[in-house]
Image (tube, rainbow, N blue to C red):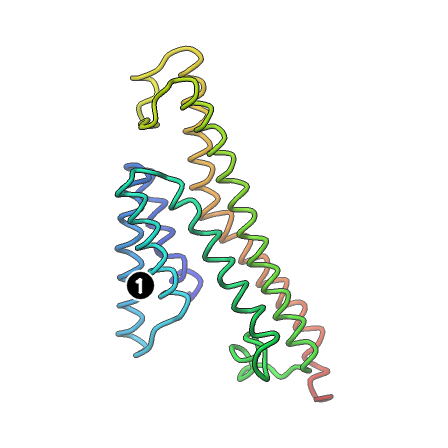
Amino acid sequence: MKLLVDFFPVLLFFLAYKVYDIYVATAVAIAASALQVGWFRLKYRRTETMHLVTLGLLVVFGGLTILLQDRAFIMWKPSIVNWLFAAVFLGSHFIGERPLIERMMGHAVRLPSRIWRRLNLMWSGFFIAVGLANLYVAGQFFTAEQALIAASGQTAIDLAACGEVFSQELLDLCLTARSREEAWVDFKLFGIMGLTIAFVIAQGFYLARHIPNATDL
């Protein structure tokens, strides 16, 4: 349930994109993230750091996307969010008595200190990997977009109207850019959610191997 709540803005972004375009979807995501923070505050009388960070970055990068009509800002945002979390987890590995993952889960699971620290590094690595994966998928779009801009001489291109604006080779370039934008939107929801679920499941198997040894603490 919590995973669905965490991905609520991304889900609405995806749906809005399929109906409208990336700019409307960005505005919807900002509103959904603000609603997410408010709902969590009302229900649990507290706020999640992850939700606040996501909202802040959405307001900044989403706002720039809408204001400047530049997709690059919103496409960079998932990488920056994940790298920020990686930095926080990695920093907690060297600062403080306990790594962040132990502070988050230590009340429910007893593990040796070395296992907590190893798990903390695994989460850091996961966030770094997701950020790089997003950058790779977004980079495919940036490459296609630059090829279209160079060939057409236009900087403000409505990818939803490729057939109305271009023909022949330029149409092919426009459709390629459009398909890669769609691929990034799909990755933002299904790719990142899938990677997260797979990692959480793998973490569960890893913890199961070490929980019986928690009495060695």
Q: Compared with residue 204, is residue 129 higher up or lower down, i.e. above or below?
A: above
Q: Quick check: 103 above or below 167?
A: below
Give the x, y percent position of residue 31: 26, 55
Say what amino acid the circle numbered 1 marks: Gln
Judged left or right of residue 135, residue 65 is left
Image quadrant containing the N terminus: bottom left
Could you tell whether 45 is left or right of 107 in the image? left
Frontmost residue, 64 versus 167: 64
Residue 73 percent coordinates (x, y):
38, 45
Q: How many marks?
A: 1
Q: From the viewer's perspective, tell me whether residue 171 is left or right of residue 85.
A: left
Q: Residue at x 51, y 58 (%)?
A: 83
> Which class describes the residues within 10 Å of circle 1: few (<14), some (14-19), or many (20+)?
many
Q: Position of residue 212 (x, y in %)?
A: 71, 81
The answer to which image quadrant residue 177 occupies is top left
Q: At 54% from the left edge and 58% from the top edge, which residue is drawn?
A: 197
Q: Quadrant of residue 87?
A: bottom right
> Does 159 sit above or below residue 196?
above
Tell me the quarter of the image containing the C terminus: bottom right
- Mark 1 lies on a secondary structure that is helix
- The residue shown at (40%, 41%) is 72
Q: Position of residue 63 (x, y in %)?
A: 28, 49
The residue under label 1 is: 36
Residues 103 and 96: in front is 96
